[in-house]
Image (cartoon, rainbow, N blue to C red):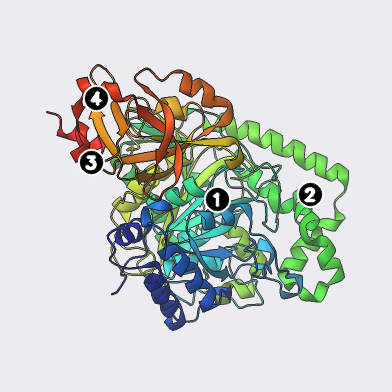
Amino acid sequence: MSVESLAIADLLQGYQARRFTVTQVMEQVLSRIDSAPERQVWISRLPRDRVLGLARVLDTKPPRSLPLYGVPFAIKDNIDLAGVATTAGCPDYGYTPTASSFVVQRLLDAGAVPIGKTNLDQFATGLVGTRSPYGACRNALNDAYVCGGSSSGSAAAVASGLVSFSLGTDTAGSGRVPAAFNNIIGLKPTCGFLSTSGVVPACRSIDCVSIFALTSDDASHVASVAGAYDRTDPYSRRAPPASAHLERPFRFGVPGSTQLEFFGDGEYARLFDEAVKQLETLGGERVEIEFAPFRVAAKLLYETAWIAERYVAVGDFIERHPQSVHPVTRQLIEASRGFSAADAFRTHHSLMAARRAATEAWGDIDVLVTPTTGTIYRIEEIDADPIRLNANLGFYTNFVNFLDLAAVAVPAGFRRDGLPFGVSLLGRAWSDRLLLSLADRLHRASVKTAGALGAPLPVPGSSAEWSSLSVFDSTPFTVPPLASVGERIEVAVCGAHLEGLPLNAQLTSRGATLVRRTRTAPHYRFYALPGGPPLRPGLIRVAEGGASIELEVWAVPAEHFGSFVAGIPTPLGIGKVELEDGERVCGFICEGHAAAGAHEITSLGSWRAYLTSKP
């Protein structure tokens, strides 16, 4: 048995087909890591016995029972995993948390298997991946070059095929620059979408947890699991129910030609021009915008009193342990001591002015497109000029969180020397899904290989909760709202309320989120009821002669559950539905008498199969 692909859809399908077990996959993952070239990816790895112990527990559960069943992942070492030291790239700062961060715990609960903690620029301060006492993390495609930072190890782990996905963080580009340098997807979600509870802060007011994956499919699937409102995080946000879609042609903005900067890298300039043409081929209309306001916002992060927010995070530690801190990191953070409270307010006023100017420059474009970086550097170049060259790498990234934008870093080609190039798709807050959809199209049109693997991109799979709608679908889609687990009621649906079907908006408009796709226990008969539109099914529990029926489990905010139930017409109602793993959840059931006038479709096993079978 050999597992060729760690793409999430491939793993989930393999588990469901019983081609391999979680234990077998984890044994291969650990073996692959042991034999991989040393690129300073890891700060710590979970003991083999712990990883295989988690795998054996999962092997006792049905593969369809968890959305990330048996999926291996890595965690940037400024994010807490219970029982494993968090160092933030500084051994003397390290502590061992008793609880995992909010996001990590959601992934664990969904069946994902943690492999280890990854290397980073110390205290997440840097875009290079070299500012670490654990060694400079090396690029997965060419180890003479920087991996990018600060989430260096997380990106290298995915690009090298060591894990399926990884978590990073992003304040000034740390979740995007390493993705661009390693030919993978980097999702920098809307600020507040992924909780930062249990994350060592850099600039807490604009920090994000980011996701690295080989494809947009995988990134979107992880985001749909990890994203939830966290009442313990004051920066966590609930997404408003809102619709957005791109039509043909969509309008994408690019910086004016005189405002683009490639730092003398003609190859990156050529590749950006090709990416813009590719977007036009995909149905986009190019619009040059005034980029100056975005650059003004970018400069506020490190050149004004805003740097003091990094001092708030770790300044006390630096004062007590100056020799424990990387010299460049210490130089940058200690510089903030010269700013006053008045300076902080002046910076805030400047930021508000930059936001207003950027909004006006945005105009009516749907998406802003920039290079993710203007060039890439050798490690020796960064060592010789660490601050100036690092700043160059943030030219197109530093402003994004300041302006409350979502972003996806997308592979978009290779230089002639084989080093990857990437662009970033930027959108307004809560445009994450739209960006991921467009990113998938651009990615597959521009690049044929995944990460540093030399293997073809995984085919689009069924794992992604957001992947079913084309970015050019004429039907508006709803950006997945956030909801706290403690404030939701799970509801099983089997018919017109399924994702993409006519009544699904009754769920999404109430802030409901898709939890998982599963099946009932084999105790039900299934009918197509008369009437419509829309057509509706009836699920009836029987003592014998039943079958297992496909359904989806959605989590509905408790405050909207009553209004949802009130709209259900007879002979349907809400009762307890038994799932294939024995769990019972609220769900649609049908009164038994309705079977007399209905068409039985039990043998088809699902409502989608019935709709497909109709002439």
Report how far apart the C-alphas of labels 3 and 1 lie in the structure.
62 Å
- Looking at the image, which residue is at 65% across and 42% down? 236
- Secondary structure category for the residue under label 3: loop
Residue type marked 4: Ala
For label 1, the residue is 396
Cα separation between marks 4 and 2: 70 Å
* Residue 253 showing in the rendered view: no
Q: Earlier in the sequence, mark 4 or mark 2?
A: 2
Mark 4 vs mark 2: give the one in front: 4
Q: Amino acid at mark 3?
A: Gly
Which SS class for mark 2?
helix
**Which secondary structure, mark 1?**
loop
Do the CB atoms of the residues marked 4 and 2 lie less than 8 Å apart? no
Q: Position of residue 426 (x, y in %)?
A: 49, 42
Question: Which kind of residue does numbered mark 1 sit on?
Answer: Tyr
First reached walking from the N terminus: tag 1 or tag 2 = 2
Name the residue carrying label 4. Answer: 595
Instruction: Give percent across and percent down for residue 534.
Output: 29, 20
Q: Are marks 2 and 3 in contact (CB under 8 Å)?
A: no
Q: Amino acid at mark 2?
A: Ala
Does residue 307 sit above or below 351 in this rendering? below
Side of 614 relative to 503 (left or right): left
